Each structure stands twice: as C-alpha cells, then as structure tokens.
Image (cartoon, grey):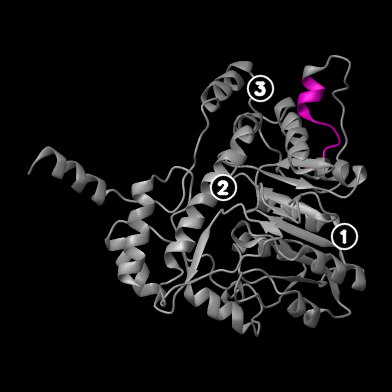
C-alpha cells in the first residue's frame, strides 16, 4: 500500500466524535497562573467571570456555580414554592434539569413539544396550567431559542415565573437579544463539551440584587460570606453565620479562569458551528429518509447540537457507528423514567424515538463533515 493510500485509510478509519472540548490558546497559561496563585478555589476570578458573562449576554445579577444543574436547582429554590406545587417543563431534556424540581419536593408536569424544533410547545404549556402550577421551565433545545415572546406572555397572563434552561444556548439570540437578557431566571452550562467550555461550571442570572445575594449564600452552604473574603482581606471578620440550608455549588477560580480565556472565542466557535449546520441542512434537504429541524429567521441558534429525525434512527446510528461516526439521542423522554410521573406527550414520544444528533463542534474538519454527510445520505 502506498503512503498516500495509507494516509487516506487512516483518515477514513478515524473516529469522528459527537462533541469536543475546544480549548483556546490562552487556557493553559490561565490555568497555570491560577495554580501558582495559591487560590484555585472560589475567589476573585469567579466574580470576574460573572461580570464578563453578564456583559456578553446583557444579563443581570449573575451568580457563578459549578454546573447548570446547580444553577437550575438554585433557580427553583429561589421561587420558594409550596411542597407539591407543579412546575411545567419539557420531557425532552437532560434528566438533571427535571430532577432539580424533585429536589425541592415539587411536581414536574410535562408539556408536549413542537415536533419540528424539539422545544416546548407554548399551547401545550397552557393546557397544563392548573391552580397548583407554580412556575414554567423552558429549554432552548440544541441552542435554538424557544418562542420567548409567547412564553413570557403566557407567564404574565397566569402570573407565573419563568426559568430558562440555557444549557445549550450560550451565544444564541432571540429577536436580536442574547439569550440570558430576558426577564426570568436563566441557567447556563459550561460543561466540557458546551459551546463555552470551562471543563465544568454554570451560571444563573437572577431577577434582582436580593435574589443574587441569596443565591450566593445558598451556593456556599448557606454561609453569609465567602472564604476568600474572610481569609484574604485583613479587615474582614472571620466570624460568619449560616442563614439557611445551602449547598456546595460555588464555581472554582480554576474553572473561572478557563471560562474567561474561552469567552472571547465563543462567537468564533459558534460561527464555525453555524457553518457546519448549514452544510448539513443543505445536504440533507433532498434526503427523503431524513428530516431536519425548522429554523425561524427571528432567532439565531448556538448550534450546540445538530439533530435530524429518522424513522430508522437506531439502524442508522448503528450503521454510522460502524463507519466510525459517533451519534447521540438527545433526549429520551424524561416522562418514561420511573422517577417521574408519566405523561401524554405524543410529539415528545415521536421525537425521542426518531432524533439522532450528529457530530457538531468547532474542531470538525472539512473532510470529517463530508464523511458525516456522505455516510448519512448513503445509509439513510
């Protein structure tokens, strides 16, 4: 076999991963600086990141935490709903988003989704509203924003708070406004494969300075002052109080340093994702066995995931895997898990049975994108 043929075979045999943790050039230096500072735990860099991400999104009252699950839990906790109150939510999401409702002794009520976007359906939300409804939780599936005008209008009509699960949506926008700049509680993820990767981490935009102060207390075991402030500032008292039951949810400066180094590159990475998504959508537009998701002109996705719908989903996934292409099934309907109540959500059932997510991250090369496209068209 010639050298060229060997190289071609090695390229063809290379596994194409579903996602990837792309790290900017400045990340390594930022991490080393934190490690040498003697303070890698929660401290000033986490505070700095809160401000930087708020400036980027146009959000207010930010609170950095160690995961999006933590951010969502704090959002639910801040509402102080009565035990047993209902939170209307989507079944098509990562299970952690709905587990936080159970953490607070509340009842998730699953509303059906839009079959062509994967996002929660506003009309289905309204059908679920009862006297026990305490809040709405919406998720921007794959980074494509929900119809926020309709969501917030419905919430206002019934006087309900809104929690936006923005785990996929860093950098996305709705009617020229960044996700994170609206009126509700918004939770973001900086987990390893997210568009803004800090290896792990999260952030919650709250609705007032008072909510933010309470969330900061809750994220550190309910303690009313930070360890950094008490130990690094001589004038500070080492005496503290514990205001209420809290959690170990604070973001470390190590993760914050990574996030700060990554943030200036978020738009560039999202643009690459958008280009890949456009190539996929164009290629699959004439593939009858594959359906792409609908996209409106008044919003811009962050393209965290690229999803297609295929009736032979499992067969296609296995065939792609045999060609070295990793896919996902985001997400099984949460209402099927025994920890939740079942629900009559036929569109979510159909979506979860057919959805296949394809490789999507800024590290994908042109040849890899071509391999995915050719394989899907060939095998579907």
Question: Residue 215's spot in the image, x, y percent?
Answer: 82, 45
Total marks in image: 3
The N terminus, quarter of image: top left
Q: Label 3: which residue?
A: 39
Q: Which residue extends farthest top? A: 234
The residue positioned 81% from the left and 54% from the top of the image is: 185
* 380 in the magenta segment: no
How crowded is the residue under tag 2: few (<14 C-alpha within 10 Å), some, or many (20+)? many
Identity of the residue drawn at 80% across and 49% down: 181
Left or right: where 54 falls relative to 293: right
Q: Disc 2 or 3, which lies upstream in sequence?
A: 3
Q: Residue at the left extreme?
A: 1
> Which of 122/285 is in front?
285
Q: Secondary structure at mark 3?
A: loop
**In the depicted view, which residue is nearer to us: 291 or 222?**
291
The residue stretch that appears in magenta:
220-231
Q: Which mark is residue 194?
A: 2
Residue 325 visible here: no
* Mark 2 and mark 3 residues within 8 Å of each other at the beta carbon: no
- Whether 100 is drawn above or below 240: the answer is below
- Earlier residue among tags 1 and 3: 3
Quarter occupied by the C terminus: bottom left
Where does the image place residue 72, in percent across and percent down from the top left? Answer: 72, 55
Question: Circle 1 is placed at which residue position?
Answer: 80
Mark 3 burial class by Cα count in 10 Å: few <14, some 14-19, many 20+: some
Task: Say what secondary structure mark 1 lies in.
Answer: loop
The residue shown at (35%, 68%) is 377
Q: Categorize mark 1 by other alpha carbons within 10 Å: few (<14), some (14-19), many (20+).
A: few
Q: Gap in Å between the C-alphas at discs 1 and 3?
A: 34 Å
Query: Tag 1 or tag 2, which sits nearer the N-term?
Result: 1
């Amino acid at each position: 076999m010639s050298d060229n043929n060997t190289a071609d075979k090695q390229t063809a045999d290379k596994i194409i991963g579903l996602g990837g943790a792309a790290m900017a050039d400045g990340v390594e230096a930022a991490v080393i600086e934190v490690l040498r500072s003697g303070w890698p735990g929660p401290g000033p860099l986490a505070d700095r990141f809160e401000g930087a991400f708020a400036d980027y999104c146009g959000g207010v009252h930010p609170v950095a935490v160690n995961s999006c699950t933590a951010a969502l839990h704090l959002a639910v906790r801040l509402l102080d709903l009565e035990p047993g109150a209902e939170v209307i939510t989507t079944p098509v999401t990562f299970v952690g988003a709905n587990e936080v409702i159970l953490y607070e002794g509340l009842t998730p009520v699953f509303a059906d989704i839009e079959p062509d976007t994967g996002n929660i359906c506003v009309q289905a939300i309204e059908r679920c509203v009862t006297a026990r409804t305490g809040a709405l939780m919406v998720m921007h599936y794959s980074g494509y924003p929900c119809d926020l005008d309709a969501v917030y209008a419905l919430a206002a009509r019934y006087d309900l708070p809104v929690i936006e699960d923005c785990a996929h949506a860093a950098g996305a926008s709705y009617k020229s406004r960044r996700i994170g700049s609206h009126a509700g509680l918004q939770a973001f993820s900086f987990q390893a494969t997210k568009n803004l990767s800090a290896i792990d981490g999260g952030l919650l935009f709250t609705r007032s300075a008072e909510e933010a102060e309470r969330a900061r207390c809750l994220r550190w075991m309910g303690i009313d002052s930070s360890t950094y402030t008490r130990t690094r500032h001589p004038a500070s008292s080492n005496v503290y109080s514990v205001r209420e039951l809290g959690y170990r949810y604070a973001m470390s400066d190590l993760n914050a340093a990574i996030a700060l180094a990554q943030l200036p590159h978020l738009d560039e990475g999202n643009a690459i994702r958008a280009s890949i998504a456009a190539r996929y959508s164009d290629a699959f537009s004439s593939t009858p066995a594959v359906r792409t998701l609908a996209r409106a002109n008044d919003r811009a996705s962050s393209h965290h995931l690229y999803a297609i719908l295929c009736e032979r989903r499992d067969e296609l996934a296995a065939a792609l895997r045999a060609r070295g292409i990793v896919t996902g099934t985001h997400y099984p309907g949460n209402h099927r898990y025994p920890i939740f109540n079942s629900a009559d959500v036929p569109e979510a059932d159909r979506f979860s049975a057919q959805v296949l997510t394809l490789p999507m991250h800024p590290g994908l090369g042109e040849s890899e994108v071509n391999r995915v496209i050719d394989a899907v068209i060939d095998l579907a």
